């Protein structure tokens, strides 16, 4: 859990882009959202075992996950980069032979490993940590040279600290989607139609601007990319 996607604030309240989206979708369904805390290692298993009904937790739609659960349409596009001390690196190539932190259970590990191999690193040094906070601490204490995750998560974890920057271009795209139990097409379709209705009404954009707009703490450059199936 990390801002601005989903986190617990100083008052102990669940908040973030995913949380606002979850409450909005539940309202459209005529239901009340009962939030359950998950992490990268538990969110899929909780869905498979019925501990939760849907998962809205900054989860990338990957081939591996799609083998055991189903996904909604993409609700937010992002991509993986590497956070490092400002001015030290200029491109992904610079991380060949360097140590990079990643959160356990994140598909960023596989994506970065493949990319570094492609760039000529015979033995990528990718170290796993329990949380984003631990990854950042490892970077601050020089246990690693970089820390990889989705851009919005890197922004949230670093808290806008100007000593750090996301380096280079996105090396692996991320398709944030809502997880639903496998073979529940009725539920998946309901979620998809709600997402489209929220886009058409401006509700989705209002939530986006709250967390990622120009005046937000975690401002993302440019216009948000939308799934091609969503009417413009």
Image (cartoon, rainbow, N blue to C red):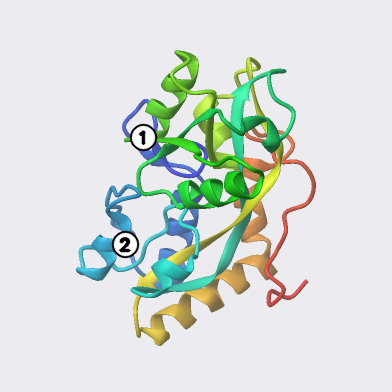
On residue 44, the disc is 2
**In the depicted structure, whether residue 76 falls above or below residue 100:** below
Q: Characterize the local packing of mark 1: few (<14), some (14-19) or many (20 or more) Cα atoms within 10 angstroms.
A: some
Residue sitting at 61 percent across and 34 percent down? 96
Can you tell which quarter of the image residue 195 is in?
A: bottom right
Q: Residues within 10 Å of mark 2 (few under 14, many from 20)?
A: many
User: Is residue 184 visible from the viewing direction of this image?
Assistant: yes
- Asked if the residues shown at circle 1 and circle 2 are in contact, with their CB atoms under 8 angstroms apart, the answer is no
In primary-sequence order, the first of circles 1 and 2 is 2
How far across and how far down the image is residue 139, in percent? 49, 21
Q: CA distance from mark 1 to mark 2?
A: 17 Å
In this rendering, is residue 156 above or below 23? above
Which quadrant holds the C terminus? bottom right
Q: Residue at x 41, y 67 (%)?
A: 64
Front residue of this view, candidates 9 and 58: 58
Q: In the image, is 193 to the left or to the right of 200?
A: left
Residue 127 in picture, x, y percent from top left: 40, 34
Q: Is residue 18 above or below residue 28?
A: above
Q: Residue at x 37, y 72 (%)?
A: 180
Q: Quadrant of the N terminus?
A: top left
- Residue 24 picture location, percent across and down: 48, 60
The quarter holding residue 14 reads: top left
Most foreground residue, 48 or 6: 48
Quadrant hosting residue 166: top right
* Residue with the mark numbered 1: 131
Q: Residue furthest front?
A: 122
Rendering coords of residue 98 (x, y %): 55, 28
């Amino acid at each position: 859990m990390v801002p601005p996607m989903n986190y617990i604030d100083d008052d102990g309240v669940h908040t973030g882009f995913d949380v606002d989206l979850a409450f909005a979708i539940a309202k459209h369904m005529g239901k009340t959202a009962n939030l359950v805390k998950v992490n990268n290692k538990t969110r899929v298993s909780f869905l498979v075992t019925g501990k939760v009904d849907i998962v809205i937790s900054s989860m990338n739609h990957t081939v591996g996950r799609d083998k055991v659960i189903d996904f909604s349409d993409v609700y937010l596009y992002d991509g993986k980069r590497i956070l490092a001390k400002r001015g030290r690196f200029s491109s992904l190539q610079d991380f060949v032979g360097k140590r990079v932190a990643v959160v356990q259970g994140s598909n960023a590990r596989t994506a970065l490993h493949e990319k570094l191999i492609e760039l000529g690193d015979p033995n990528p040094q990718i170290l796993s940590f329990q949380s984003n906070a631990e990854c950042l601490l490892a970077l601050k204490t020089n246990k690693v040279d970089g820390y990889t995750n989705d851009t919005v998560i890197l922004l949230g974890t670093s808290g806008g600290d100007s000593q750090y920057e996301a380096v280079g271009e996105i090396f692996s795209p991320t398709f944030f989607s809502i997880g639903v139990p496998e073979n529940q097409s009725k539920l998946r379709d309901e979620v998809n139609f709600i997402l489209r209705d929220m886009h058409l009404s401006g509700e989705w954009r209002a939530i986006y601007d709250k967390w990622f707009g120009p005046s937000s703490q975690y401002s993302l450059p440019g216009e948000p990319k939308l799934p091609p199936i969503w009417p413009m």
